[in-house]
Image (cartoon, helix red, strand yellow):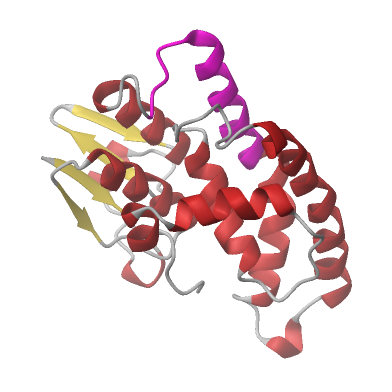
Amino acid sequence: MLTIWGRTNSVNVQKVMWAVGELGLAHRRIDAGGAFGGLDTPDYGAMNPNRKIPVLQDGETVVWESNACVRYLAACYGKGGLWPEDPAQRARADAWMDWMITTVLPDLGICFWGLVRTPEAQRDMAAIEAAAGRLGPLWQILDEWLSERRFVAGPELTMGDIPVGCAFYRYMNLDIERPGLPNLQLWYQNLKARDAYRQHVMIPVT
């Protein structure tokens, strides 16, 4: 049985739990991080020297970093599905996974931390609005890509959709200005039709 350490309102934990749900894997999740603490113990440090969430344990294998966890689960349990067997398609999935981390997350983080985790009186609204202004054109890149595709790597859901889908839910639930994104909205509706997405991602943004 898989064990995942992390709290449900962490976008990085949501990636792993969505993948687990899509694959129908037996698992247990242990609350860790944030108000739950537990990251400063010797045992946790032995699993993840960075002392962050999530951590995934599968038998003797321990994986940390959320995208690495998703890739591991897809490679072990989702060949031909979440893990595309065609290397070119798999590279497309990989690219969008990394795009979420390197390109979208910095400005999404500014908006999320500023609007959700910072008291209203302490918010830097100029920084939040500037970040939101940069996010719109970034999402338009994916919107254009999806004009000819149902999912980010092709006609079926793959691991590539998971980090991006978690980020987009958060983006759609922040009080910021957004451009029209018609192709992304169609993709988003497809995600919302999936039980695992509704269960693990579509929860209050806190």
Q: Residue at x 42, y 19 (%)?
A: 84
Q: Magenta stretch containing residue 91, yes or no? A: yes
Q: Characterize the magenta stretch by its predominant secondary structure.
A: helix
Task: Judge whether residue 103 is colored magenta.
Answer: no
In the rendered image, residue 196, in percent from the top left (x then y), is placed at 33, 53
Give me the residue at 47% from left, 51% from top.
191
Q: Is residue 98 above or below residue 66?
A: above
The count of marks equals 0
Q: Quadrant of residue 128?
A: bottom right
Compared to 63, does 115 lie above or below?
below
Q: Position of residue 41 (x, y in %)?
A: 27, 53
Q: Is residue 144 left or right of residue 118?
A: right
> For this rendering, which residue is in front, 87 or 71?
87
Residue at (36% x, 48% y) in the render: 18
Where does the image place residue 122, in percent across and percent down from the top left? 74, 84
User: Can residue 39 be spotted in the picture?
Assistant: no
Q: Quadrant of residue 94?
A: top right
Vertical position of residue 203 compared to residue 197: above or below: below
Picture residue at 44% right of the left edge, 65% below the top = 202
Residue 131 visible in the shown view: yes
Highlighted range, magenta: 82-101
Which of these two is toward me, 113 or 149? 149
Quarter of the figure that contains the N terminus:
top left
- Percent x, y of residue 157: 45, 35
Seen in the image, is 193 located left or right of residue 180?
left
Report the side of 159 relative to 147 (left or right).
left
Q: Is residue 170 left or right of residue 3?
A: right
